[in-house]
Image (cartoon, grey):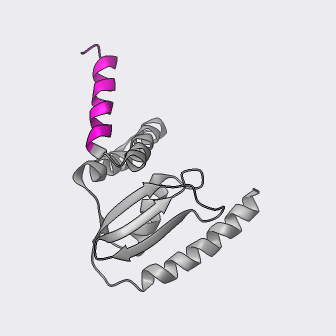
Amino acid sequence: MSTLTTRAGFDSFSARMRGELAALPAGPRPLHIEQAALAADAFFTHRVDDGGHHVAYDPRQIDPLSVRQFLGIHAEFTEDAATAGVRAAYYAADTAVDRARWGVVLGEIDRSQDPAGVLAACSRVLARAAGGA
C-alpha cells in the first residue's frame, strides 16, 4: 500500500468519523477498546451505546495512542485507572524510547483486555531486571 493510498484512505476515514462523532451528545463516556483485524484503510471501528464508546482498531494500521488521540479530539471518554495511568506515563515520558515502551504496554492491554495482569507482568519483568525475585 503506497503512502498516497494510505493518506487518501485515512482522510476519507477521518471525515466519516468526524461526522459520526460530531453527532454525539456531550459528556464523557467509558471507553472499551480492543484490537481486531480490519480491512485496509478501516483503521478503527466505533459505536456508542449506553455502555460507552466501543472501539476496535487494527494495530497493523494505527497504534493505540493514535486511536485515543483521534477519539479524544472529537469525543470525551474515560478509561480504567490502570490504562489511564499508562496513557499518562506515555505523555510524560522524556524520550522516544520510553514512549515506545509505554506504547507497547498500552497495546498489550488492548490485546489482552487485562490491564491489571499486564501491569503485574511488567512489574515482574522489571523486578527481575533489577535483580529481584
Residue shown at 38% from the left, 83% from the top: 24
Please, what is the dominant secondary structure of the magenta stretch?
helix
Q: Tell me residue 1's x, y (percent).
A: 75, 56
Q: Residue 103: name its quadrant.
A: top left
**Residue nearer the viewer, 63 or 32:** 32
Q: Tell me residue 30's x, y (percent).
A: 28, 66
Q: Is residue 113 magenta?
A: no
Where is 66 relative to 109, above or below?
below
The magenta stretch is 116-133
- Placement of the C terminus among the 4 image quadrants: top left
Q: Residue furthest top?
A: 131
**Residue nearer the viewer, 114 or 6:** 114
Q: Tell me residue 116's x, y (percent).
A: 26, 42
Q: Is residue 48 left or right of residue 38?
A: left
Q: Is residue 122 magenta?
A: yes
Q: How many marks?
A: 0
Q: Residue 123: name its quadrant.
A: top left
Residue shown at 33% from the left, 85% from the top: 25
Q: Is residue 70 left or right of residue 84?
A: right
Where is 98 relative to 62, above or below?
above
Q: Tell me residue 66's x, y (percent).
A: 48, 58
Q: Residue 104: name its quadrant.
A: top left
